[in-house]
Structure formats: structure tokens, C-alpha cells
Amino acid sequence: MRLGKEYIGILSLLLFAIGCGPSISEEKLNQIGELETILDSSEARVLSIDTALAKQLADTFELKLYFFQYKLKDTLPREEATFIDTWYGMRKTVRKYSRNVDLILNEINISKKQMQDLRFDAENGLLDEKQFDDYISLERNNVEKVGYAADDLMNRFEKVYPLIQKKLPRVDSLIKAYREKEIQKE
């Protein structure tokens, strides 16, 4: 019986210690919510463009670019050469989007998970204020970086995407005309 009372006493002390652990103010916990809002906004912006359609357009762009770079052998009139040069000039943005869109979405998801874990730890008294301040500072830095990367990517792509769609019919007609000319030579 005495052993049971000792366990109850020890258990009571542990529960009291856990219940009286460090608590983070509601104001500081709101900082997590602010960062989560920024992440949600960045994610929504990246997902505002149908990524499958955008990747398909990027693949089409690369095929047309390949034709101009390696298959087109003739000297072109100045207007057509200038047009192809502007098409070629969009390649960096298209390639950057294709390479980075999944990476940015993954970073957003990682940051969201970090926010959830930080909130859980803070609400359950697993962090003192100094630790919380350190973690929230690191997370704020990460969120700012991923937000900047998402904005930069989308600003560029939103400018180029409509231009590619607009220029695609002319690109197709140039390629078709060149191929017809090549057939006539044979």
C-alpha cells in the first residue's frame, strides 16, 4: 500500500510539473498564425496556374526551341529572326519554372509542418520563451525566403506564360513553312 502512495505522489508531482511548464503568450503564438497565412498565400499563388498545363506548355516550348536551335538551317528575314530571338529569350523563365515549381511547393509544405510542430511544442509547454523566440526567428526567415522564391518565380512566369501562348501559333507556322520548304527542295 505504501508503494502505491509513493507512485501516486510521484505521478502527481510529474503532472504538476508538466502542467506548470513554460507557457508561451497568446501574442507569440499568433506569430505562428501569421507565418502560416504567408505560406498559404504563397502556395495559393503557385497553384493559381495549372501546373500540369504549365509543364506541358514548357515541354512544347522546349521542343520548338530545339527546332530553332538545331534544325533550322536557313537564314531568316530580319522580322522572323527577331521573333525567334524573343522566343529564345523566354527560355530561362520557362526552365526556371519547370525546375523550381515542385521544389517551392515542397518547401512550403515543409515549412507548414514546421509551423504545426512549433505550435504543438509551444502549446504543450515543451519550449521556454527563449527557445520559442529562436525557433520563430528561424522559421520567419525560412518563410520569407520561400515566399520570395514563390513570388519571384510566379512574377516571371505570369509575364512569360501569356506571351508563349500568344506566340505559339506563329512559331508553329514558321516551323511548318520551313518544313514545307525543305520538302520542296527534295
Image: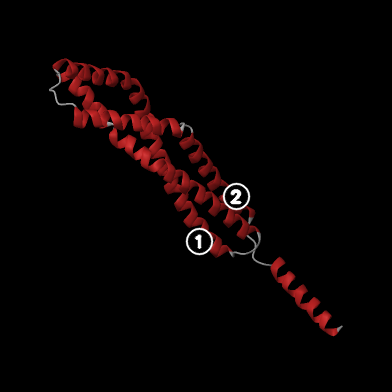
Assign the N terminus to one quadrant of the image.
bottom right
Determine the image quadrant of residue 166: top left
Mark 1 neighbour density, 10 Å: few (under 14) some (14–19) many (20 or more): few
In the depicted view, which residue is nearer to us: 66 or 21?
A: 66
Q: Is residue 65 above or below residue 35?
A: above
- Residue 56 location, x and y as percent? 39, 31
Which residue has dot 2 on it?
30
Viewer-proximal residue among 167 and 31 = 167
Residues under numbered marks 1 and 2 in contact, where contact means CB atoms less than 8 Å apart:
no
Task: Give whichever of discs 1 and 2 has the lower sequence position.
Answer: 2
Residue 48 picture location, percent across and down: 48, 32
Q: Amino acid at mark 2?
A: Asn
Residue 10 vs residue 47, the one in the foreground: 47
Residue position marked by numbered label 1 in the rendering: 134
Relative image position of residue 125 (x, y in whole percent): 64, 63
Residue 160 or residue 50, whichever sits in front = 50
Q: Secondary structure at mark 1?
A: helix
- Looking at the picture, which amino acid does disc 1 mark? Asp
Quarter containing the C terminus: top left
User: Image point 65% across, 58% down: which residue?
Assistant: 123
Q: Which mark is residue 77?
A: none
Tell me what residue is drawn at x 60 percent, y 55 percent. 119
Residue 79: horizontal and vertical position, in percent? 18, 18
Instruction: Give the structural element (helix, strand or loop) at label 2.
Output: helix
Residue lying farthest to the bottom in this orientation: 2
Q: In the shown orientation, is residue 83 left or right of residue 74?
A: right
